[in-house]
Image: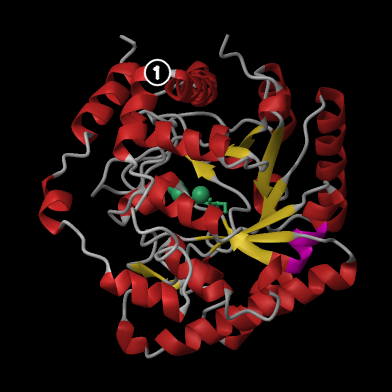
């Protein structure tokens, strides 16, 4: 049990298992792995697909001939090992040209270059069969609000996304776009810092139906927010187009920990929401092995992300079937308001009836809902004694 198969729809990025263990204070601790090798190893682990930034595969300064050779070899590996590329994205953060933003740079030449680079990357993604296109605006932000671009930046961002959505449609790519919010790092403040911000912004785009969100566990946690609450809102809005699963201690730098490594309870309710809501998208792990690890540790990390997901999926099923938990849940939810139709649908008559109803306010306030017991039962189930 808990051995993944492609039916589980697990994906990793080339940049995740390919991470060489660099951090701001030290260089790489691992050798780079080639893309075809990563494809082979992920397939052996039962993964469904692999995602990429343009420059994870094709170096930014590759010639056209080099690009074609690299892409040909990658496609060969995908077909040899039966892996898909469900999602593609652009590296708009690594090159110094983007040091003060890509779509939100104050330099119109950089904004135009970001559009050009993204169109080329969308072409690559489409060639590889990607259906989801992610925008993570890592450099879209400021340290200096004296730059005076807080309003302009949102306008530039919107214009770029509108442009690229039209490009996708004009090419017949049919991409669904997913905005990935993050509150900070590498910028002091990143624009559109949370899932809620991104959802609000999408409503201002020319083709909002083409855009959803790509929430990340670590990013909402960095903002001090609850990841399950964020994805619940995205699901409710019909906007959960993709998801970045990992883990993170609150109040720390971006850690990209193995899924479930730090907050298994948050991971449990994340899995439960995805499974209960009928989410059909990819379960993508945007995380990497600890810098301490060698290559064996990388595959232990990848296997661990997927095993934890599958274990929690099984726990979610147990939770649903646990009679005591279900009874506690039933007791918690009082179904009948005792006011007939009056509170369910507005009409002048219903409103009048509701206004006339006598509530026992003191009794409502005195009721204990049993949440301590419900939570303890959940903990005991997670801790493996139920
Ligand atoms: C991060 C981000 C990135 C993005 C990636 C794909 O914190 O570095 O999560 O890993 O997810 O660029 O959009
Ligand atoms: Mn991240
Ligand atoms: Mn990260
Ligand atoms: Mn991410």
- The prevailing secondary structure element of the residues shown in magenta is helix
Return the x and y of residue 4 as percentages of the image width and height. Answer: 63, 19
Q: Identify whether 132 is placed above or below 105.
A: above
Decide which of 110, 261 is in the foreground and name it: 261
Decide which of 271, 175 is in the foreground and name it: 271
Q: Is residue 219 left or right of residue 17?
A: left
Marker count (numbered): 1
| The magenta stretch spans residue 262 | no
Image quadrant containing the N terminus: top right
Q: Name the residue located 50 percent from the left edge and 40 percent from the top edge.
A: 273
Decide which of 294, 240 is in the foreground and name it: 240
Which residue is identified by label 1?
323
Return the x and y of residue 167 as percentages of the image width and height. Answer: 80, 73
Return the x and y of residue 233 as percentages of the image width and height. Answer: 47, 57
Q: Name the residue located 37 percent from the left edge and 87 percent from the top edge.
A: 147
Return the x and y of residue 141 as percentages of the image width and height. Answer: 42, 72
Q: Identify whether 149 is placed above or below 35.
A: below
Instruction: Write the start and end of the magenta stretch as one range.
Output: 119-123
Indicate the secondary structure of the residue bearing disc 1. helix
Q: Is residue 354 left or right of residue 30?
A: left
Q: Tell me the quarter of the picture where residue 255 sits.
A: top left
């Amino acid at each position: 049990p808990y051995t993944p198969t492609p039916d589980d729809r697990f994906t990793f990025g080339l940049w995740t298992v390919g991470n060489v263990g660099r951090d701001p204070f030290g260089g790489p601790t691992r050798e780079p792995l080639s893309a075809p090798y990563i494809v082979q190893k992920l397939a052996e682990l039962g993964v469904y697909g692999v995602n990429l930034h343009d420059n994870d595969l094709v170096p930014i300064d590759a010639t056209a001939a080099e690009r074609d050779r690299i892409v040909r070899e990658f496609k060969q590996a995908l077909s040899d090992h039966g892996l898909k590329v469900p999602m593609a994205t652009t590296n708009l953060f690594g090159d110094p040209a983007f040091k003060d933003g890509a779509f939100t740079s104050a330099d119109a030449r950089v904004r135009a270059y970001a559009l050009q680079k993204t169109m080329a990357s969308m072409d690559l993604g489409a060639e590889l069969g990607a259906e989801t296109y992610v925008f993570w605006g890592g450099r879209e932000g400021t340290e200096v609000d004296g730059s005076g671009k807080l309003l302009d930046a949102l306008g530039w961002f919107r214009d770029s996304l509108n442009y690229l959505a039209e490009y996708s449609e004009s090419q017949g790519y049919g991409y669904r776009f997913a905005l990935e919010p993050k509150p900070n790092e590498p910028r002091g403040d990143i624009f559109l810092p949370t899932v809620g911000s991104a959802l609000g912004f999408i409503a201002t785009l020319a083709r909002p139906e083409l855009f959803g969100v790509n929430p990340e566990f670590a990013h909402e946690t960095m903002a001090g927010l609850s990841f399950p609450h964020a994805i619940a809102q995205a699901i409710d809005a019909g906007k959960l187009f993709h998801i970045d699963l990992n883990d993170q201690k609150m109040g720390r730098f971006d850690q990209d920990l193995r899924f479930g490594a730090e907050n298994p309870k948050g991971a449990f309710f994340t899995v439960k929401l995805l499974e209960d809501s009928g989410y059909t998208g990819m379960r993508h792990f945007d995380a990497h092995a600890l810098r301490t690890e060698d290559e064996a540790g990388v595959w232990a990390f990848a296997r661990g992300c997927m095993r934890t997901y599958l274990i929690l999926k099984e726990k979610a099923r147990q939770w649903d079937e646990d009679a005591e938990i279900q009874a506690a849940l039933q007791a918690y939810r009082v179904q009948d308001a005792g006011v007939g139709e009056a509170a369910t649908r507005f009409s002048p008559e219903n409103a009048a009836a509701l206004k006339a109803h006598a509530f026992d306010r003191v009794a409502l306030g005195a009721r204990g809902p049993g949440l301590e017991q419900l939570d303890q039962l959940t903990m005991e189930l997670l801790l493996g004694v139920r």
